[in-house]
Structures are given as C-alpha cells and as structure tokens.
Amino acid sequence: MTTAVDTSVVMSARGITKVYGATRALKGVDFDVRRGAVTVLFGENGAGKSTLMKILSGVESPTSGTLILDGEEIVLSGTVDAARRGIAIIHQELSLAPNLSIRDNIFMGRELVRGGLVVDDRAQTEKTRELMARLAEELDPDTLIEDLRLGQQQIVEVARALAGDARVLIMDEPTSALSGNEVEVLFALIRELTDAGVAIVYISHHLEEALEIADHAVVFRDGDLVATGDRDAIDMGWVVGHMVGRAADDLVPDLLDTFGDVALRLRDVTVADPSNPARLAVDGVDLDVRQGEIVCLYGLMGAGRTELLEALIGRIPVQKGTVEIEGRTLTRESVSERIDLGLALVPEDRQRDGLVQTMSVGENSSLSSLLRYVKGIWLHKRAEREAVDRGIGDVRVKTSSPAASITSLSGGNQQKVVIGKVLMTTPQVILLDEPSRGIDVGAKAEIFGLMAREARRGLAVLFATSEVNEALTVSNRIVVMSKGRIVRILDSAGATRNDLMFASGEASEEEPSGSDHR
C-alpha cells in the first residue's frame, strides 16, 4: 500500500535571475520545492539548473528575485545559514578533502562535541558507521578519501548531506559515479526520506534513471524554466524534446559496418587490483579492436573495465599477457611513449586526471602534445596556438577564447577539451572511460558523434560505460565484463537490455548462451 505524502510547497524561488558579466544564467525563474516528493530538473549543461540549486542552498546569491521558505521570504547568507534552516546540497563535482578521513569529511565544520569543548570522536565514528551502513557501504570511518574509488567518494558526499538531517535536500548528479546496485540503494534511501517528509530536488543527466525516481519534473533551457509535468504525464520523448528540441532517435550517431585491420590486440591480459595486489582486477582478457570499429566495455562497478583501460595506457602494470598496437607488442613503455605509439586514454575522472584546473582551455588542450611544438629550447607558440585553435574548433568546444579558464566551461565542454587534447596526439587507438559521466543528453550526443567521426576516419575506439542505452546504441560490439573476465560478447545490432543485464549479473536469471568470439 502506498503511503500518502504531503506535497505542499516547502520552499519557492520567485523571479530569480543570475547574471555573470554579460551572461544571464537565469532569467526570472519561478520554482517550487514540494515536501515529501522528488522534483527532477532536466536540462543541458549551462541551462541554469546548477546555478538555481546553488542559490537555493546559499552557495550563491541571486542578482534579483526572492526565496521563500515555509511561507516567509528569506535571504541566505551562505551554506552555513542554509544548513541551519535545513537545506543541504550534494554537489556535482566532489568537494571532499582527500587527505582527511571519511569521518572528518562528514563532520567538517559541524563537529560533534561533548562538554561544549572537546570533539567527540567516538560519537562521530559511530554516526559515520551508521550512515555508511544506511548507504550499504561498510567502510572504515578512518579510511582516507584519497584511498576510495570515485563511487565510494560520491557515497561519502551523500552521507555528509544526510548527517545534517536536512528537510530540503538538493542532489546535483548524485549517481554519476555509482554502480547499478549503489543507485538502487540510494533510490531506496530517497523514498525513505520522502516518506518522512523530506523535499528532494534531483538533477541528473541519466534520463531513464531520473524518470524512475521523479514525482515531478521541470526542464530548463538557456536560463529559462520551459516545461513542467507530473511523472505520469512525461516520458523520455517529452524530456528530450523540451531539452534540445530534437527527438531522441536523432541524437544517435551513424556507425560503420565494415572495418579495417586489427589495431588493438589483447591476449591473456591479466592485471592485479592496485588497491589489493592479491586480487586480480582483470583476469585473462582476449580482445581485438579493428580500425573503424567502436567496441564497448560494459559491466558493473568492479568488473575490471577501468583497470583494463588504465593498464593499456600504462598507468598500472600488466601482470601477464600481451598488448599489441598496430602490430607492435608493448612491453614496459611509459604513458608518454604509448601516446607516441598511437594509444590515448580519456580518463573517467576528468577533473582529477584529465584537466589541470589552474590552466586555460588552450593550455589544457595542448598539454599532451606540447613537445611537438618545441624547437630546440624554445616553444613555438604560434604553431601551438594554431593547433589549439584547430583542435577547439574540431571538437566544437563552446568557449569565449582559448585563454578562458577551464573551470569556466560546462561539464560537457570540459569533456570535449579532454577528447580534443587526446586527438591532438594523433592516436590510432582511443580509449574512453565513462565518456558521458556528468554531462547532458545534448553533450552526450556530441561526444558520441565525435567518437563515431573518429571511427569513420579509421581510429579504433574502445570505451567503457555503465549505461545500457549507450552500450546498445553507440557501439558495434559490446564486451560484457564481470569480476575481471569477459563473460559475453554481443553484436550491438541484435543485443537487448536483458542480454546485458543477465550477462553482467544485474538481473537474477540464468545467463543466456552467447558468443565467445573476439
């Protein structure tokens, strides 16, 4: 039996505008947050969603407009003021201190004290254990954040928000690095919170996932709120149509159906888990990827996809087996040497591994190929600048200029800078780890369009994803991994969602028989 919830408005924004220089990020937005319900915000990067959420949570102040909480107009002086009023936010980009423990991150700035003087470490440790158990992550509270994988760090972000007992909880891309099982746990927790009357505001670029949890939906485009609807009145077509003005089918790239010679050959590739060398993260993988072919690595978190890609680029060692690029066997080559040989990786975490936050768009773009513009002891700046301009134009980065800060770009445009940087090294094989993480449907279409374009130019493309729809629509073949092994290889044209879920272990049914060809 479904429990009735109070969906009255607990918080409102009226006529909110936000101006950054010549840019109007929000244009007089009216928005309601409903008690005991999940309101999902859809929109492309730069549409204004995150800006509004920062205003609702006290991170930023509006240029004009008013905020109303419990029927009274309020002015938030900052995040501490918002937290005091019961408003918390989980940011899209992680804001954890990597050199501190899980416990210290959760209680930073709001420590539990006894006697009004001494931090109560025991109470904080116990509360941390409770929060981790609630989120189905049995992690030691003393574990350093830098020792956690990305998905676990995101779980800590969620735990930090829950520790404040918020009644308005804003979630900006809370599942971007979570596995399918972790998403299920989070969704169960969200329903537990809404049943208790908590108002949830939820932003996600995973459209199907967001529709699953939504009670209400709104769509932003170019700083305006352009559409609203209740869950039973909306579907994927409604969302995509209002977001980008095109049908979902129009966003799928055209792929080749004939391929060239083998560009990447793996035989019995075995990789130890970097965090636990006694365990194999990749166990005896055989795989060929041909020129012009896009191959998808699909599997649950921990399947070995990231470890395989990082071993291929040389970030972690291959324990045994062989890797060949265009017929040349790799041995102990460094990352830079493998790049010179035509192999390149777009990492999963673009903020940590793909970009230098203090550099400009142009400096990030040329970073991997900078030595090509060095003449003697001098950097040939004109040649570098011309190459950067071509590269930015080639991948269609939306930026005011190459001199702009990389942090000024949306997530989708930052990802295009990373891909453009990789393409400037003129690779023969390109590896991409979760290339659409944290970007909107329009940016995803552009990213996958770039992949398809490079494949048509003859590159071999190997990418990892945890998105079923991406695996089915943006690849020629799907390699399903589980516990470090390839368990099934599927032709994307004939594969179904159930095929992938059963093979990867996401669905509890006997695995269908499948191909074992390379």
Image: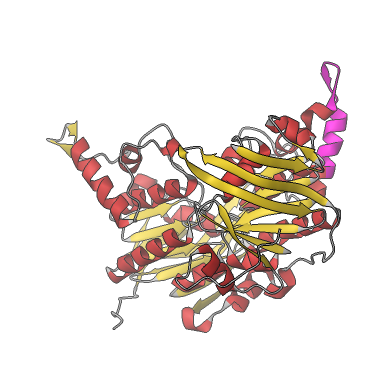
132 versus 388 height, above or below: below
Looking at the image, the residue that sits furthest to the top is 377
Magenta span dominant secondary structure: helix
Asked if residue 376 is among those painted magenta in the image, a careful observer would answer: yes
Instruction: Please state which of residues 394 and 281 is positioned toward the viewer in this rendering.
Output: 281
Residue at the spot 33% in from the left edge and 50% down from the top edge: 83
Left or right of residue 152, residue 26 in this image: right
Instruction: Please state which of residues 254 and 199 is positioned toward the viewer in this rendering.
Output: 254
Q: Do we see residue 399 in this rendering?
A: no
Left or right of residue 274, residue 267 in this image: right
Q: Do we see residue 333 in this rendering?
A: yes
231 versus 123 height, above or below: below
Left or right of residue 2, residue 371 in this image: right
Residue at the spot 66% in from the left edge and 33% down from the top edge: 359
Looking at the image, the residue that sits furthest to the left is 115
Location of the C terminus (image quadrant): bottom right
Residue 514, image x, y percentages = 62, 69
Location of the N terminus (image quadrant): bottom left
Residue 364, image x, y percentages = 70, 36
Residue 93, image x, y percentages = 51, 47
Asked if residue 225 is among those painted magenta in the image, a careful observer would answer: no
Q: How many marks?
A: 0
Left or right of residue 91, residue 451 in this image: right
Residue at the spot 46% in from the left edge and 56% down from the top edge: 174
Query: Magenta residues, as a range?
Result: 373-390
Residue at the spot 87% in from the left edge and 30% down from the top edge: 382
Residue 64, image x, y percentages = 51, 56
